[in-house]
Amino acid sequence: MAEDKKPLLIKRYASRRLYNTETSDYVTLEDIASFIRSGREVQIVDLKSGDDLTRQYLLQIIAEHESRGESVLPTNVLNDLVRSYTTQATSAVPQFLAASFEMFRESQSKWMENMNKANPMSGVPGFEALQAQQEAFLKAMTGGMSGNWSGPASDEASAEAETPSESDDLDAIKTQLAELQKKLSKLGK
């Protein structure tokens, strides 16, 4: 397990091929994305110069996903990011983004803990279907990175019609996202 704590070292050869130093084989960008989705940190270095190329390759992975229509970043957020490179907010943006994602991970973790605990609402009719819908929504929002789910989630339950509370939850999330985007826009000005 200690091995999972240190980053997986990937070396880039002059031919631009990427070499996994743990398994002694070549990997693709999609392989690297899979390592990251499974919770593994990676470090990509140029074999000849020793330069750290991790950021460059992570941005390339994001760009490829976005270009395939797997959009996570709304256009206005991308615009704000581009603006942040040319404004005084440049120094504040990385800390803001890191703190935002950390808060998201923490709240996701706490939400999952609460979902996995014995819930007094479990006896309420329709609760299992609502729980399954919330789990499916969280999986969709996180790209399936949230790990194993426990509980009575099933495809049948998540296929049921939307409930008013699910719609309200989605509206609340959209509102929160809009507020975060406004704050990010203000930082960029």
Image: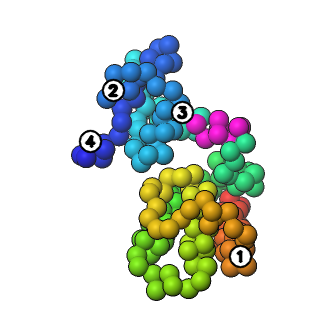
- Whether residues under marks 2 and 1 lie with C-beta atoms below 8 angstroms apart, the answer is no
Comes first in the chain, label 2 or label 3: 2
Residue 163, numbered circle: 1
Image check: 128 left or right of 45?
Answer: right
Q: Residue at x 68, y 59 (%)?
A: 188
- Residue 173 appears at what percent x and percent y? 66, 70
Q: Residues within 10 Å of mark 3 (few under 14, many from 20)?
A: few
Q: Quadrant of residue 125?
A: bottom right
- Whether residues under marks 2 and 3 lie with C-beta atoms below 8 angstroms apart, the answer is no
Asked if residue 183 can be seen in this view, the reply is no
Q: Residues within 10 Å of mark 4 (few under 14, many from 20)?
A: few
Image check: 179 left or right of 135?
Answer: right
Residue under label 2, please give it. Answer: 23
- Residue 170 appears at what percent x and percent y? 69, 71
Q: Residue at x 48, y 19 (%)?
A: 17
Please check the rendered image and state whether residue 63 is part of the magenta-colored stretch, yes or no: yes
Alpha-carbon distance for marks 1 and 3? 36 Å
Instruction: Name above or below for residue 83 compared with residue 56.
Output: below
Comes first in the chain, label 2 or label 1: 2
Alpha-carbon distance for marks 2 and 4? 13 Å
Residue under label 4, please give it. Answer: 3
